[in-house]
Amino acid sequence: MTGTTTTHQGKRVLVTGAAGVLGVAVTEHFARGGATLALLDLLPIETEHFNCVCDLTDAAACATAVAQVKDALGGIDVLANIAGGFTMGDTVADTSDATWEFMFNLNARTVFNMARAVVPVMRSQGSGKIINVGARGGLRGSGLMAAYAASKSVVHRLTEALAEELKGDGINVNCVLPSIIDTPRNRSDMPDAKHDAWVAPEDLANVIGFLASDAARAIHGASIGVDGLS
């Protein structure tokens, strides 16, 4: 599937989690729109774009990577916080500290660390767009998904708090709330599901691209549901 094109000509875009399925779709969306890209991931990426290997759960590593991106691109106009993940868990009573901490580090701490590193850059520019990836599953608790739901609900609250703090600085902060994203891993985990009802990564990238565009300048602190047909 080919995504639609939103003009991002001249925009300097930083994508986290860029090696993942959604990260690749988001990267391709911004590249089609004419953006200059910097890609961060824990894994090395073979790409023509500027990229850094970065442990996003490490605040110092995030600060170093953002400084490198700023030097390479001359600034950061858009932060697409794509890094994150999902795992089914145990009951709340049986959830281990390791599972709890893994979900919060992967989904919440990565957003927190990147916001702290990027916000000073955007404030110095007087403008910027931050788009986080929450989840429909973070809107309420579900059995065997407490750690995931709780970690994604933190992303929603961070988005709202940042939006209130930064809108006076010309910075928009919003998030998308996908249902199930159509990825090879999800298809493998749920082989009998109705896959064509899920959200295509390219379609979610289109929504993220819109929130990063000038057309979304009046939107602050929104949580945009992206449900596909589910």
Image: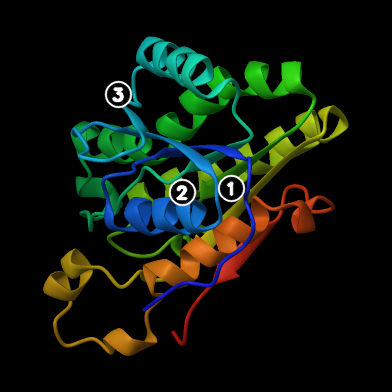
Indicate the amino acid at tag 2.
Answer: Lys
Residue 116, quarter of picture: top right
Cα distance in 3D space between marks 2 and 1: 7 Å
Cα distance in 3D space between marks 3 and 1: 23 Å
Query: Is 172 left, or right, of 158 in this rendering?
Result: right
Residue 225, quarter of picture: bottom right
State the residue position of label 2: 152
Point out residue 124 in the picture as x, y percentages from the top left corner. Answer: 74, 16
State the residue position of label 3: 54
Count of marks overlaid on the render: 3
Q: Is residue 12 above or below residue 211?
A: above
* Viewer-nearest of discs 2 and 3: 3
Residue at (64, 18) in percent of width and height: 121
Q: Which mark is residue 156?
A: 1
Residue at (69, 33) in percent of width and height: 162
Tell me if residue 134 can be seen: no
